[in-house]
Amino acid sequence: MGVVLFIDTQTLILIIIAFVILIIWGPSKIPQLARSFGQAVREFRRGARESEPEPELVEVARKLGIDPTGKSRDELLTEINNKLAQQKKVETKTTVDPKVLEIAERLGIDTRGKSEEELVKEINWKLSNK
């Protein structure tokens, strides 16, 4: 009678893969393959470390009121850009020519939260429809 081995499917698959590798590349190439695999893992880890934000980026984020805890470099850059874009929108909305504001108010146009460009368009529309 023969000996029956109880091997689960995962172990069997690993044994088959190892056997196929041994047949294809031979025993002399296996150390070289293992070395290449190790180098690939090291490069992957190095790349993962590089995705961590630089101290300067963390400092800028904190100055803008962004919590950098647990965020990658790309996530921080996205948040910083969004915050700067919001600040720019606020700045451009507050720099409306007083003459444009006066004309818009005389025509009964609501000026709150609108840019100068939006107000000029509304003024032109109101004047062309009178």
Image (cartoon, rainbow, N blue to C red):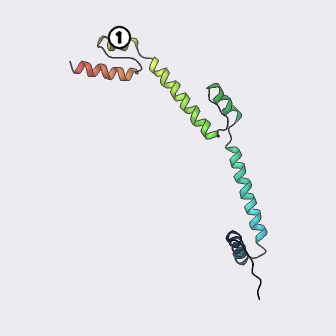
Q: Name the residue under label 1.
A: 102
Task: Give whichever of 10, 31 is nearer the camera.
Answer: 10
* Vertical comparison of 86 with 19: above or below: above
Query: Which residue is drawn at the image coordinates 74% and 67% (left, top)?
Result: 33
Residue 11 percent coordinates (x, y): 71, 70
Q: Seen from this angle, which residue lies furthest bottom?
A: 1
Residue at 74%, 58% (x, y): give it: 39
Determine which quarter of the picture holds residue 1: bottom right
Residue 27 pos. (x, y %): 78, 75
How packed mark 1 is, by other alpha carbons closer than 10 Å (few <14, some 14-19, many 20 or more), is: few
When asked about the image quadrant of residue 121, the answer is: top left
Residue extending farthest front: 1
- Is residue 55 shown above or below 92? below
Residue type pointed to by label 1: Glu
Residue 76 percent across, percent down from the top left: 62, 36
Q: In this view, does 26 lie to the left or right of 129?
A: right
Work out which quarter of the rendered image holds the C terminus and state it: top left
> Eyeballing the image, is 74 above or below 14?
above
Helix, strand or loop for disc 1: helix
Up/down of 19 relative to 66, above or below: below
